[in-house]
Structure formats: structure tokens, C-alpha cells
Image (spheres, helix red, strand yellow):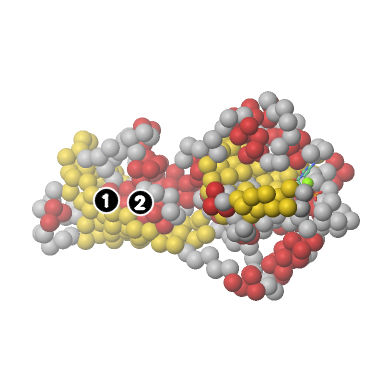
Amino acid sequence: MTHTPPPLLPVPTIAVIVVAAGSGQRLGAGAPKAFVGLDGRTILRRALEQVFAGPLAQVVVVAPADRVGDARTDAELAAGERHDLVSVVAGGQTRQASVAAGLAAVWPDVEYVLVHDAARALTPPAVFGRVVAALEAGAVAALPVLPVIDTIKRVADGVVVAAVDRSVLAAAQTPQGFRRSVLDAAYASADADHTDDAALVQASGGVIVTVPGDDHAFKITTPADLERARRLVAGASGEAAASPPALPRVGIGTDVHAFGGDGDLWLAGLEWPGEPALYGHSDGDAVAHAIVDAVLAAAGLGDIGTHFGTSAPEYAGAHAGAFLARTRQLVERAGFRIGNVSVQVQANRPRFAARRAEAEAVLSAALGAPVAVSATTTDGLGFTGAGEGVSAFAVALVVPAGVPEA
Ligand code: CTP
Ligand code: MG
């Protein structure tokens, strides 16, 4: 069954299928694994809280057929105000059948599908962000991996047959992300059972890029894993204390444009009638462009050319609002929220004093975070002093959205 979201809310372009329909034989906890308690919360609820702290997405929970109601309760508790994003469907005999059931409930507008094991309940939201960023950068499939630490041997009948070079090996985690059309096609043509979706897509010829996984994305499989997860959420373990806190990150951006464009000046998100225009691929708004570079740099997402270059013709002639709104979306999808931005313009004109507050309001609204604007002249020195153009310098702070609670 395909549901559609209420009409007034933004329609996500991402869906996360959370598979939770397994029985948990190896855990042996007397209940399906996803419904075993970690603290006051089940494994499923904890997994979904991590999902909701990540990029905005439709969330499809796949539960055992006789646990759909319990799963819906957990999902609504985890989703809070965004319960419109969640649906619950019954799973199948195998993980692959469960994913297929989830895929059938993905909304029509969704472009990227992430498949995630509920059993990886403590996966940090930033891992979701990295997978989405890889897909948005053009990958058809993205897999979080960790390097293999143990020395690996090939064995047969209780005897070591060969050593295996671990440098060419990686341990696969979830969420595994796919362009929706690729995953749909792989599932439509699946003729064998695979242990994960990356294997299925690879069997149908797709190239899968890797992104860094995370120690906290381990799969709760055995009683020892459950103990580890319980210690982590209780904050009682040396392991939790040893994991570094998620620090805010800063980025810097500068931009320069020369006077000589057509029409009126656009600068700091404002139109300045009667002022000479700046020359540029878009509107030449050096202030907006410096902010974009600073914010992208803070989130480690490249620079303005990575996302708004000449291969993105829709940004030719675009104004600050379009650049900043898209930048915010990119950064939030990568698992950050924007803290604040400070930007300084160096120019003889326009004179900012009378419109500084207006510029701050426009830029802050577009970016969804406070933007402070200051302006200075350069005492007649340099190209700004000579009135040939303007420079802008921006510093941005971004904050990782959510890490496993101590
Ligand atoms: N899964 C599923 N449907 C299945 C089998 C597994 O949705 N028929 C899900 C599990 O709920 C889990 C994920 O796939 O979140 C990874 O599977 P695994 O860790 O093997 O979980 P279980 O199959 O429940 O555990 P076990 O193999 O020990 O029985
Ligand atoms: Mg299993």
C-alpha cells in the first residue's frame, strides 16, 4: 500500500526503510529482537530516534506481522511531531523479503532509499548524512564501512588454508543508500537471496561507493552485543567515555566580484536600486557566496563550485535566497545544523549602515540561522579602495546533529 503525505508539509526526497521483522534467534531474548529493551526504550525505538535525528526522510518500519501495532507505538514515540512521516508494514521470511515489503510503501516522490537494520540501534545520524551526501554527489549506491581490524584467515575443516590480506577488506554496515530507481530495479529482478542490499545491487551490476561507517553502528546480534549497547545508552561504559564528543566545526569562505554587471546591484540578499551591479555567473552577490563557502567548508561538503558550478544552470542569475536555502538543505542532510554565520563586506559602496539589519534578516531567514553582517571600507587601498569591486569574508559554525546519548 502506498500512502501519500499530508499536502501542506514538505515531501521528503529520501526514505529510510528500517527492517525490524527478524526473530533474533542468536540473541535468544524470548522476543523478536527489535522489541527487546535497551533502557526504558526498545531497540526499535532507539534505532528510530537516531533515524529521526538524521536527514528529513519518510520512514518505513518493517515489523513482524504480529507486532505491527507495537512497532507503530514505538515509531510514534520516536517521531514526535513528525509522525506523518512514518508508516509500518509487515515483513517477510527473509531480510530481503522484508526490505521488499518496505520498498512497496515508499512514496512516489522519493529519489533516494536508505535501508537500515533496526538492530544497529545506536548508529549516529551523521552516518545517514554521509550516505545521503554520497548519493547527492551522484553515487547510485553508498555503503558505510569500517576497516577490518582482526587478522583474517581462510579456513576449511578446522585448518588454516590461507591468510587473507585485510587491507582489501571492509566490514559493511547500514544504512545502505541507493538511488531509488536502482534499488527498485534490483529488487524487481532479484533471483537469489542476498544478505544485504548492497550485495543485491552489486549482483545487478551497480557500482557501490563506500563512506566511513561508525563503531556505534554495530549490529546487536548476540547477548554480548546487547550488553554493550545497554552500557552505551546507560553511559556506564569506559567505551562511551572514550568516544570523542561531537564538536562544533567552523568554516571560512571568501568571495570577490568586480563591478560591471548588468542591471541593479544585488548584495547581501538585497537589491540596491541605482547602485552599480556586480559581475558574476549568478547575481554576483559576493556576501551570499562567501557564506555558502563558509557553511559548506564547516560541514566538510566542498565549496560553492561543488554544488552550484556551471553544471547547475538553474543557479545562473539566482539570488542569495536560493543559494542559502539549498546550502542549508545540503548541510542538514549531512547531519549538521547551522549555528551562526558572521560575514564582513569590504567595499566603498553601497553604504550598509541603513540596510544592515534588513540584510541580516533576509540572509538569516534563508539560511535558517543567525547571520551577522558588518561592512568596512579599506581606506582607499586595494581594489576595494579603488572602487573596482567588493570582497566578502565569512565564518560559519555548524553543529553535528545528535550522537548516541552518553
Ligand atoms: N530482518 C527482517 N526480516 C527478516 C530477517 C531480518 O526485517 N525476515 C531484519 C532484522 O530485524 C534486523 C536486520 O534485518 O534488524 C538484520 O538481521 P539480523 O541481525 O540477522 O536479525 P535477526 O534475523 O532478527 O536475528 P537472527 O539472525 O539472530 O535471528
Ligand atoms: Mg537474521
Q: Amino acid at mark 1?
A: Asp
Marks 1 and 2 in Cβ contact (< 8 Å)? yes
Res. 280 visible in picture: yes
Identify the residue shown where x is 12% and y is 62%.
379
SS at circle 1: strand
Relative to the observer, which residue lies in front, 93 or 170?
170
Which numbered dot is residue 237? none
Establish if 399 lies above or below 132. below
Identify the residue shown where x is 83% and y is 48%.
23
Establish if 68 lies above or below 27. above
User: Which residue lies under the disc numbered 2?
Assistant: 293
Identify the residue shown where x is 18% and y is 60%.
377
SS at circle 2: helix
Relative to the observer, which residue lies in front, 47 or 33?
33
Which image quarter: residue 46?
bottom right
User: Which residue lies under the disc numbered 1?
Assistant: 255
Establish if 170 lies above or below 344. above
Relative to the observer, which residue lies in front, 256 or 377?
256
Tell me how far mark 1 sits from mark 2, CA to CA: 9 Å
Q: Residues within 10 Å of mark 2 (few under 14, many from 20)?
A: many
Q: Is residue 176 left or right of residue 315?
A: right
Q: Amino acid at mark 2?
A: Asp
Residue 325 place in picture, x, y as percent: 44, 45
Q: How many numbered circles are shown?
A: 2
Q: Is residue 74 left or right of residue 182?
A: right
Residue 130 place in picture, x, y as percent: 53, 49
Relative to the observer, which residue lies in front, 180 or 397?
180
